[in-house]
Image (spheres, grey):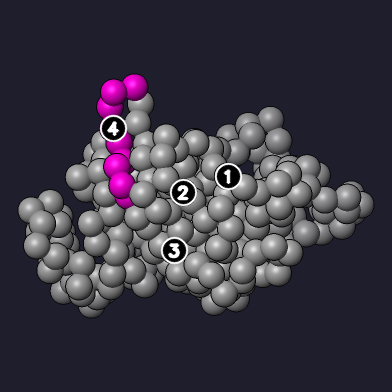
Amino acid sequence: MVIPGFDNTAPPVQACGLLNRFGSNIIHENLDFTLKSEEILGIVGGSGSGKSVLMNTLLGLKIPEGGKIYYYGCDRSRLNDRERAAMNNEIGVLFQGGALFSSLTVRENIMVPLREHTDLPEPLMCELADMKIHMVGLPAHAATLFPSDLSGGMKKRAGLARSLALDPKLLFLDEPTAGLDPIGASAFDNLILDLREAMKFTVLMVTHDLDSLYTICDRVAVLVDKQIVVADRLSEVQNYPHSWVKQYFGGPRSRAAQTAGRI
């Protein structure tokens, strides 16, 4: 990744002393977070702990009430319009459910960011969209289908294809395997691994899926008590001395995932 003004040796994303609140309800307080280059990092936490709020804040969809967020060493609040546009073009997002435009075909959905952020001719945009459809494992005929014609797994892959339209270096995934059967979830996990190897991007993933954590995550960050209390390899995280961590990683489902050899 080469963006003028950015330090390409610095962490892709870093939060320092983050404060998020809704009225008097404090969601995050003095939260520190670092995403390392080309890693897949999973964020876990209890319901209401603010995982999606954190992701939206790191994406710039929510402005924090305090603290700093850095992209490749640059304070996001100090970016000029050109730098912010360049940074946004390096970020892909897969929202839960895919968030596809229902009135557009799969190909047209993937072409949306190409239309908005490039001046490419129409035939080339179509060609790039079809290439992304192939990359995520969808059949060629899916290009002309509408979201209502797709299964849950196909919608996830179509949403992923759109998130990759601009070849981003940062990929944010919000519960990417939610709603998928075990076979579909496993296939999606393997797809992310293959694409990370091919495209060399960095992944931040909010998930409850223990199989995904054990299968593809280089590190796991635990969000409890309004902070990231630990971010490390799973072998270290699961032994962290916190009651929620012990309950989450010490339960029967976690033990089953470990026994299956996903640690």
Does 244 sit above or below residue 132?
A: above
Q: Quadrant of the N terminus?
A: bottom right
The tag earlier along the polypeptide, 1 or 4, is: 4
Give the residue type that dot 3 points to: Leu
- Residue 165 appearing in the image: no
Percent coordinates x, y for residue 47 in the rendering: 24, 39
Earlier residue among tags 3 and 4: 4
Q: Nearer the viewer, mark 3 or mark 2?
A: 2
**Quarter of the image holding residue 186?**
bottom left
| Magenta-highlighted residues | 23-31
Q: Say whether marks 2 and 1 touch (CB < 8 Å).
A: yes
- Residue 39 x %, y %: 45, 71
Q: Tell me if label 2 and label 4 are in contact, CB under 8 Å.
A: no
Q: Earlier in the sequence, mark 3 or mark 2?
A: 3
Q: Nearer the viewer, mark 3 or mark 4?
A: 4
Q: Amino acid at mark 2?
A: Lys
Of the 4 image quadrants, the one containing the C terminus is bottom left
Q: Which residue is mark 2?
A: 68
Q: Which residue is mark 1?
A: 77
Residue at image point 12% right, 68% down: 239
Q: Amino acid at mark 4?
A: Ile
Q: Earlier in the sequence, mark 2 or mark 4?
A: 4
At label 3, counting other C-alpha atoms closer than 10 Å, the crowd grade (few under 14, some 14-19, many 20 or more) is many
Residue topped by disc 4? 26
Q: Of tags 1 and 3, which is closer to the observer?
A: 1
